[in-house]
């Protein structure tokens, strides 16, 4: 009996340490270092209609396949009030390619039009992100950023030319037209996060 109680407590602690945000939840703020050596927080975006938060990295093949699509999303939606913020939650001791120095190089080489932050504070766990890429669309609701979509960017991680459903773009377009997204959650497809 004592063993069962201890197992239940352990399971609860593990679940609480990696709780998944739900649709409508207020997103936790953060202050993380960007590849330009500046600190970036969610609060800094309080004048925006929302934010496209992307947990991604350098080494994951899926993350690489989505980079151009993420850049395109930022170019299309930044001017409409939904800029991208990219966050790398991976421990560089697991993958050297995910080091801060390599993040700086990647952002420059790819011409990232958005901040690329290093998550050395476990923010991914507060959001419940498990994959790279893992998307959180945050809507600014009277100064509080609330989750309105979680999951994948679209339905074709391996081939952009075969995309039939642009889940994220459809969710943003719905928010811009004052409606709720029809699809609010999808399964994020990518590499498992190898955190600090």
Image (spheres, rainbow, N blue to C red):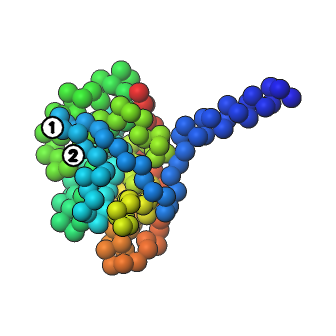
Q: Secondary structure at mark 2?
A: loop
Position of 11 with respect to 152 (left or right) is: right
Q: Which residue is mark 2?
A: 115
Residue 2 image position (x, y, % from top left): 83, 26
Residue 36: give its label. Answer: 1
Image quarter of residue 123? top left
Position of 169 with respect to 22 (left or right) is: left
The Cα atoms of the two marked residues, 2 and 1, are separated by: 8 Å
- Say which quadrant the C terminus sits in: top left
Are dots 2 and 1 in contact, CB under 8 Å? yes
- Which is more toward the observer, 110 or 40? 40
Q: How many other residues sit within 10 Å of disc 1, few (<14), some (14-19) or many (≥20)?
A: few
Taking the spot 22% from the left edge, 34% from the top edge, the residue there is 103
Residue 87 visible within the image: yes
Taking the spot 52% from the left edge, 57% from the top edge, the residue there is 22
Taking the spot 39% from the left edge, 53% from the top edge, the residue there is 135
Residue 48 image position (x, y, % from top left): 25, 63
């Amino acid at each position: 009996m004592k063993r069962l109680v201890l197992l239940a407590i352990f399971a609860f602690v593990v679940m609480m340490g990696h709780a998944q945000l739900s649709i409508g939840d207020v997103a936790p703020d953060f202050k993380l270092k960007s590849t330009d050596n500046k600190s970036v927080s969610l609060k800094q975006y309080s004048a925006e209609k929302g934010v496209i938060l992307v947990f991604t990295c350098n080494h994951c093949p899926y993350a690489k396949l989505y980079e151009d699509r993420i850049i395109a999303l930022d170019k299309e939606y930044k001017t409409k009030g939904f800029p991208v913020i990219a966050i790398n939650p991976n421990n560089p001791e697991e993958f050297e390619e995910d080091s801060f120095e390599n993040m700086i190089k990647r952002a420059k080489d790819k011409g990232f039009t958005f901040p690329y932050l290093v998550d050395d504070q476990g923010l991914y766990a507060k959001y419940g992100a498990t994959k790279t890429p893992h998307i959180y669309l945050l809507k600014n609701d009277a100064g509080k950023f609330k989750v309105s979509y979680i999951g994948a960017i679209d339905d074709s991680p391996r081939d952009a030319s075969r995309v039939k459903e642009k889940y994220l773009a459809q969710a943003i377009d719905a928010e811009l037209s004052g409606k709720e997204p029809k699809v609010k959650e999808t399964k994020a497809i990518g590499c498992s996060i190898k955190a600090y």
